[in-house]
Image (tube, grey):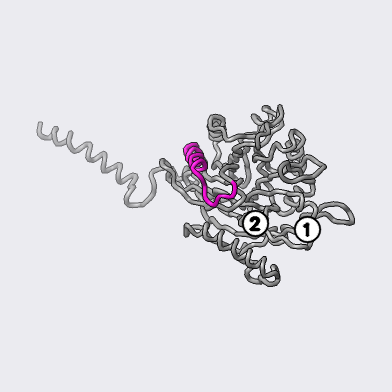
């Protein structure tokens, strides 16, 4: 009887020891999970971005860029100094804040630019236009149709406005598939200056009920990340308001990884945040300022290029890394096309050559100081030359 008790006690111990020897999880350092499942996602798998703010065309820009001999507006030289920078990323996104409704061309309050304006942005390196902004309906259906026809004709990635509900259902959220990545891009605006999109056209609004459904649809497609380009906030204010922050909280809760803000026409700070319930940092650019425009009041002549990298962790979660920025100055002079985007560090290295006028130099210095103060609130952001 005693021997039977010893056997009953010892048998389970022997089995446990045998299992430990067989798998040896502590001695070899090998994970008990199948190694193949961990190797499905390469930690070095990444995709790079340059993003920026509002591309606007006021009438003085058109007049200044027009070639007197041909009558054609030539905008390409506006982007001479930033073209090599933009083209270095996989995804290059800009808020296209005008319409291609044809002549007569106009600026504020109802924008319409010539096709050459959009062509120059494509040649500058942009490959993604977001269209949902407060000027999307300026020229009715002809403006919306013009923007969509152009983007489709040059095979430009785009989202935010649609010809009808069927097109929105088929193409939204926009799913960007490149470099082994599947990314949902959402785009919406706070409004369209009181001008409703004519039926059957659709401009995405900041509608949390609809947006919740859009997030669900994106997640159902097993995307690797969700990016939201959003037109929000209060014009000319240097900091985000309470409405922006509340909307951002909604976007984080629904799964956004990056928020790209536009509309205030001035640069607002950007932040890396870890929302409640998340283990990963998220990136928000509250406002990128103007990309190019004829707005004159300081600091509407300031803008940002923000670069970042999305990297896949071995568990399939997107990790934001290498966040960097280039502050630039919208320099206006009498040389056609009259408007030039001047990157900070490059311009400072040879200021007298690039901006010879002392008053303009002072304005440039003020723009750089203001923008850098907003960016330097967090030491994880690096200013770069290119």
Q: Position of residue 49 (x, y in %)?
A: 60, 51
Rendered residue at 47%/57% (across/down) = 378
Secondary structure type for disc 2: loop
Q: Is residue 80 magenta?
A: no
Disc 2 marks which residue? 301
Position of 132 with respect to 308 (left or right) is right
Q: Is residue 66 visible?
A: yes
Label annotation for residue 354: none
Foreground of the two, 326 or 176: 326
Disc 1 crowd, CA 10 A, few/some/many (<14, 14-19, 20+): many
Q: Measure the alpha-carbon separation of dots 1 and 2.
A: 16 Å
Among the two numbered marks 1 and 2 on one chain, the one whose residue lies closer to the N terminus: 2
Q: Residue furthest left?
A: 2
Q: Position of residue 161 (x, y in %)?
A: 67, 36
Q: Position of residue 78 (x, y in %)?
A: 73, 58
Foreground of the two, 163 or 21: 163
Disc 2 crowd, CA 10 A, few/some/many (<14, 14-19, 20+): many
Q: What is the magenta range? A: 235-254
Foreground of the two, 262 or 256: 262
Q: Is residue 237 magenta?
A: yes
Disc 1 marks which residue? 337
Q: Are marks 1 and 2 in contact (CB under 8 Å)?
A: no
Secondary structure type for disc 1: loop
Quadrant for the N terminus, please.
top left
Foreground of the two, 214 or 316: 214
Q: Nearer the viewer, mark 1 or mark 2?
A: 2
Q: Is the magenta region chiefly helix, strand or loop?
A: helix
């Amino acid at each position: 009887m005693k021997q039977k008790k010893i056997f009953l006690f010892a048998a389970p111990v022997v089995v446990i020891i045998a299992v430990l020897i067989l798998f040896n999880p502590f001695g070899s350092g090998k994970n008990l999970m199948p190694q193949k499942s961990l190797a499905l996602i390469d930690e070095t798998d990444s995709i790079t971005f340059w993003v920026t703010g509002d591309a606007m065309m006021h009438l003085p820009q058109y007049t200044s860029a027009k070639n007197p001999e041909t009558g054609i507006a030539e905008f390409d030289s506006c982007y001479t100094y930033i073209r090599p920078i933009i083209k270095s990323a996989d995804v290059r996104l800009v808020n296209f804040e005008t319409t291609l409704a044809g002549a007569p061309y106009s600026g504020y309050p109802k924008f319409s630019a010539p096709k050459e304006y959009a062509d120059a942005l494509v040649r500058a390196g942009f490959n993604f236009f977001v269209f949902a902004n407060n000027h999307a309906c300026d020229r009715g259906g002809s403006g919306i149709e013009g923007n969509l026809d152009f983007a489709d004709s040059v095979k430009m990635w785009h989202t935010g406005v649609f010809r009808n509900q069927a097109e929105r259902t088929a193409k939204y959220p926009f799913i960007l598939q490149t470099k082994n990545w599947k990314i949902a891009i959402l785009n919406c605006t706070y409004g369209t200056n009181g001008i409703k999109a004519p039926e059957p056209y659709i401009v995405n609004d900041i509608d949390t009920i609809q947006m919740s459904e859009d997030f669900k649809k994106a997640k159902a497609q097993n995307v690797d990340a969700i990016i939201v380009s959003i037109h929000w906030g209060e014009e000319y204010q240097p900091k985000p308001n309470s409405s922006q922050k509340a909307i951002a909280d909604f976007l984080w809760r629904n799964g956004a990884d990056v928020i790209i803000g536009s509309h205030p026409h001035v640069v607002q700070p950007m932040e890396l945040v870890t929302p409640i319930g998340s283990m990963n940092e998220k990136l928000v650019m509250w406002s990128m300022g103007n990309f190019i425009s004829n707005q004159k009041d300081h600091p509407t002549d300031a803008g940002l290029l923000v670069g970042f990298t999305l990297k896949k962790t071995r568990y399939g979660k997107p990790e934001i890394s290498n966040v960097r920025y280039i502050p630039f100055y919208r320099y206006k002079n009498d040389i056609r096309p009259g408007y030039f985007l001047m990157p900070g560090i490059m311009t400072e290295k040879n200021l007298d050559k690039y901006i010879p006028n002392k008053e303009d130099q002072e304005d440039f210095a003020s723009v750089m100081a203001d923008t850098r103060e907003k960016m330097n609130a967090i030491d994880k952001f690096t200013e770069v030359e290119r």
